[in-house]
Image: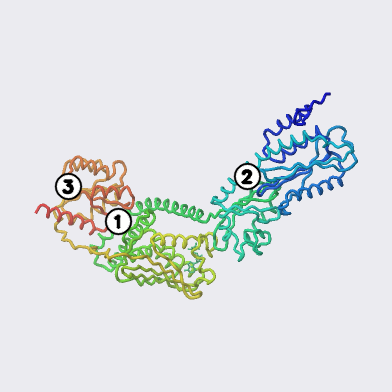
Amino acid sequence: MDMASNGNGLKEIHLPVLYNFARAISAVFDIQTLMTHFFNILKTAVDFDAGAYFVRHENHSEGRVYVKGGMDKSKVDAFSAAFLTRVRGVCRDLPEERLPAFGVSILMERGNGAEKTGPMRFIDLPLKYQGDTAGLITLVSYGEKDPFEDPGVIDAMATHANAVLEGLLSHMFAEEKKLAEILLNMSEGVFIIDRNGHFTAVNPKGLELAEGLCDREVSCVEGSSGERGVFSECDCDFARCVKRIKESAAPHEKVRQEEIKNAQGRIFTLSISSLDLEGGYIITAKDVTEERLMQKRIMLSSKLASLGEMAAGVAHEINNPLQAILCNIELLEYNANDPGHKRLKRVRDGVLRIKTIIKDILIFAREQTTETENADLNIVIEKSLDILKHQLRMVNVGIRLELSPNPVIVKINRNMFQQVIINLLQNARDAIEDSGVGSTVTIRSELVAGKEAVVEVADDGPGIPENIQDRVFDPFFTTKDVGKGTGLGLSVSRKIVEGMEGSIVVASSPGKKTTFRISIPHHGVVIDERRGKKRREYDYSVLRDKSILMVDDEEGVLQIVTEAVTPKVGSVEPVQNSKDAFERIKERDYDFIFLDIKMPGMDGMDLFRKVAEAKPRLTERVIFMTGDIESKKTADFLRLTGCRYLAKPFAMNELLDVMCELTLRADAVKG
Ligand code: ADP
């Protein structure tokens, strides 16, 4: 006998078949490949006509029919139907929708494949997972001869396949659990949508985002009939956006990105990829509103920073000629007994205003710190107005100040608070200008000691329509033309005020007025920030015999300042560079040395250091002159040396006052 049989009823001839099968499935990762090998390799040993498998586990179910090449369609259908009935018999608790529509594969042919006729013979091989029914393999034969008479090889292969299947299922189960955990903890919303547009799964973040994504009363994730997934019937932006993407996606396009903005101005990015297996989609959604706001703020603050740098340079250039103009005016004033005298006074006031404005712009543009300090809101308001006054006047918007007569001192960041006031003033101006309604902005301040400080910015402009009143603080909400509004002013203002533990609210009567009310908590006592600022009157005769060295690289400034102080003091020596100045200092102990800070070559700071080395006593007599007081380097230097300074452009009496003050102090020390 050429067919030996071993103890298990397995013929030796079948051993190579089993070996082939074991080799083929040694590295399969999915059930379908395992089963395809099963049927194709079994066909080399057993003459069956068709076979099928069905496996279910947790949320997963799959199955497939394998038929001999050239098999009649009616026979294929009859077998599929018979298999389905057998599956139902084995898996009684399986809901109908979990039964897959079985795809059909052609088996590798053995022999001539001629059509056989005869009775249908079945053999069923149940599949198990940890002792429970996990599915079924069925084989069918139509011939007169029964190929299943000797089931040894069939059983052996099925047992082997089942062992591999168990491994695959537990791996899949573990992977599914891992995936579920990832989805559960993801900071992005994930929606899985089947090919009909119905949600099949949503992670918790997705449910949370759905409220913003879908603005209908019944969120499309929940579904109008209570159950999930009526997504395709929803007409919200989210549903429309997903449909649009699905319809316009190129056939091979895997991932598409879109952005939607809801009615509240929140921005979401959606990334949609198609799923190969099921023909569905997976959508990940992220709320990027805060991120965008941050980006815009960073952009704005970097713009502001570069503006600050530019302003510092411009200020330095402007302050020098202003200094010369101011001195010239003052000299003319002393001699003037004619009607031009009044005009000169006005010119001088104008120059002093320019000086304050430049200084304020510098402070506003440069210091972007978040530090808080005690500051008088009345002063911050006045400074903000200084910056915007001109703009408001240009569009005929008047200002009414109803500031508290007492200082309103709270702990704030001056610059940020100034930014809030400026935002509010600009909005009021825009509203009045764009609508032609209204003419006045009223700013009111009040301190309820121990409770709160209140600032109100009210305008008699067009007001804010009721339906948008609760949206004006939303980031990117704007009714202004493209290029004019960013929609960030109020949202940034709210962030700033809230950062100071305060609140900002709006009240508006459309057609009549709009009032923004800021409240900042007030803790503790009232301090008067403005105390002690009154100017002292000096008797300039104490300067009569003083010797002065005046160092400035700007010839115009040097000349005129020298000319202006000469009548009041003993002597003035003007020098245009630090090197010459140092030579003279070595020669003579001046009573006062006025030093410009920014000079080519050795600058004022370098010269000061040399003086400190050569004649330390003289450093007390140095008074700096600078047009760039707001620069950090200058400010740090001045703080470190403790020297007095004059911010250009300064009036002659400021220069004389500082000398008087130092003289009196030195006399007091001596006396
Ligand atoms: P933007 O000024 O760039 O539009 P904001 O956040 O500062 O951004 O303002 C948002 C919107 O609030 C404005 O576009 C405008 O419609 C409305 N708004 C703000 N202030 C006023 C006001 N005083 N009067 C009327 N509408 C205002």
Q: Is residue 182 above or below residue 341?
A: above
Dot 3 or dot 1, earlier in sequence: 3
Residue at the extreme top: 1
Amino acid carrying mark 3 in the image = Tyr
Q: Which residue is mark 3?
A: 590
Horizontal arrangement in the rendering, residue 150 relative to residue 383 (left or right): right
Image coordinates for residue 628, horizontal then vertical, percent: 32, 51
**Residue at left offset 35%, top offset 67%:** 453
Indicate yes or no: mark 2 CB to ligand 1 under 8 Å.
no
- Residue closest to the eye, 237 or 106: 106
What residue sits 27% from the left and 57% below the top? 650
Can I make out residue 41 in this image?
Answer: no
Quadrant, the N terminus: top right
Q: Position of residue 385 (x, y in %)?
A: 38, 65
Q: Residues within 10 Å of mark 3 (few under 14, many from 20)?
A: some
Q: Residue furthest front?
A: 7
Left or right placement of residue 49 versus residue 391 in this view: right
Of labels 3 and 2, earlier in sequence is 2
- The numbered dot on residue 173 is 2
Q: Which mark is residue 649?
A: 1
Residue 209, percent across and down?
Answer: 56, 57
Q: Which residue of the protein is positioned furthest toward the left in this rendering?
A: 671
Image height of 525 relative to 555, above or below: below
Contact between marks 1 and 2 (CB within 8 A): the answer is: no
Q: Residue at x 55, y 50 (%)?
A: 186
* 235 shown above or below 30: below
